[in-house]
Image: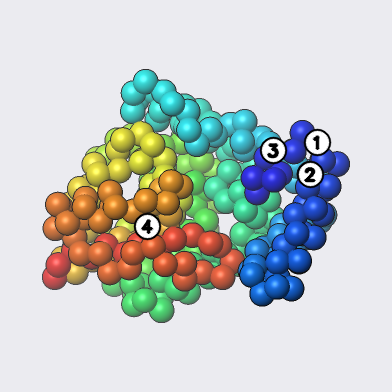
Amino acid sequence: MHLLMAAPSRDAAEQALAEAGLAAAELAAAELAEGAGRGLAEVARLFAAHPDAWRTVHAVADSVDHAPDLASPEATLAHWRDGFDRLAAASPEAGVALYALGDAGLLAQATAEVVGTLEAWGLLGPERDALDLGCGMGRFAEALAPHLRGVLGIDLSAGMVAEARRRSRHGNVRYAVGTGRDLDGVADGSRHLVLAADVFPYLVEAGLAERHVAEIARVLRPGGAAVILNYSYRGDPAGLTAAAARHGLSLERAGDRPLRLWDATAFVLRRPA
């Protein structure tokens, strides 16, 4: 995806993908990077199938800067709130999962894979309630709804929450605009599951990650679990490990990549029963 972001035009992006694909093929032949070759091939396929892919990637990059270097957490939250409000109007699918290049079919497959993984881990059930933190357009909340008693989706972006409500098809899902600072409004011990998919990288940059770990510990029921998919784009989970310990949560998974369609690193935090 960095290749597409760096390319100044669609033609330049096609050339960059072609050159990178050749390099990956040479490495794969030497048994060094078979996975990289498959990943590049999938990006190239999506890029060819979607004429607006280059424009989509750059719209996301222009709207949401992952390193805004702003003066305060409040300024950083406002920056991202505005960016995701713009993306809600322009391309909600790309805004919540850029790797799909706005491909709704691929996004649905990747979403179903996450839900299946949560089910395989024993985290779903008809008597359980979940919080989808940073719910975006509601793709996970809606997919989880048939497997749970209730789902609450919270997002900083009012535009994304409005889009989630517009798309909602399940009576056991509700959405709310959050502050981005905490989980105010979510009752203590009310959630069996908290899902935070691609949310914590923003919280890490804003200096609000540990605050949210503490809030997750507060809202989880005894024995409940939080699943964090991607903690930090810097690749350093040490802060999460320490924060979990300080707030009484055990770390059951720590940075493996259990998904086939999305290379997210997974962390599972558990509140003692």
Is residue 258 visible in the rendered image? The answer is yes
Residue at x 32% of width, y 68% of height: 253
Q: Residues within 10 Å of mark 4 (few under 14, many from 20)?
A: many
Element assignment for label 3 = helix
Report if the CB atoms under discs 1 and 2 are less than 8 Å apart. yes
Labels in figure, total: 4
Q: How is the image coloured?
A: rainbow
Q: Amino acid at mark 3?
A: Ala
Report if the CB atoms under discs 3 and 4 are less than 8 Å apart. no
> Closest to the observer: 17 or 179?
17
Provide residue 239's location: percent of width, then percent of height: 28, 49
Occupied quadrant, residue 43:
bottom right
Element assignment for label 2 = helix
Residue matched to label 2: 13
Residue matched to label 1: 9
Element assignment for label 1 = loop
| In this picture, residue 173 sits left or right of residue 40 | left
Provide residue 54's location: percent of width, then percent of height: 75, 42
Q: Earlier in the sequence, mark 3 or mark 4?
A: 3
Q: Which mark is residue 6?
A: 3
- Between the residue at mark 3 and the residue at mark 2, the CA separation in whole angstroms equals 8 Å
- Between the residue at mark 3 and the residue at mark 4, the CA separation in whole angstroms equals 28 Å
Report if the CB atoms under discs 1 and 3 are less than 8 Å apart. no
- Between the residue at mark 1 and the residue at mark 2, the CA separation in whole angstroms equals 6 Å
Q: Which image quarter holds the C terminus?
A: bottom left
Camera-nearest label, 2 or 4: 2
Q: Amino acid at mark 4?
A: Ile
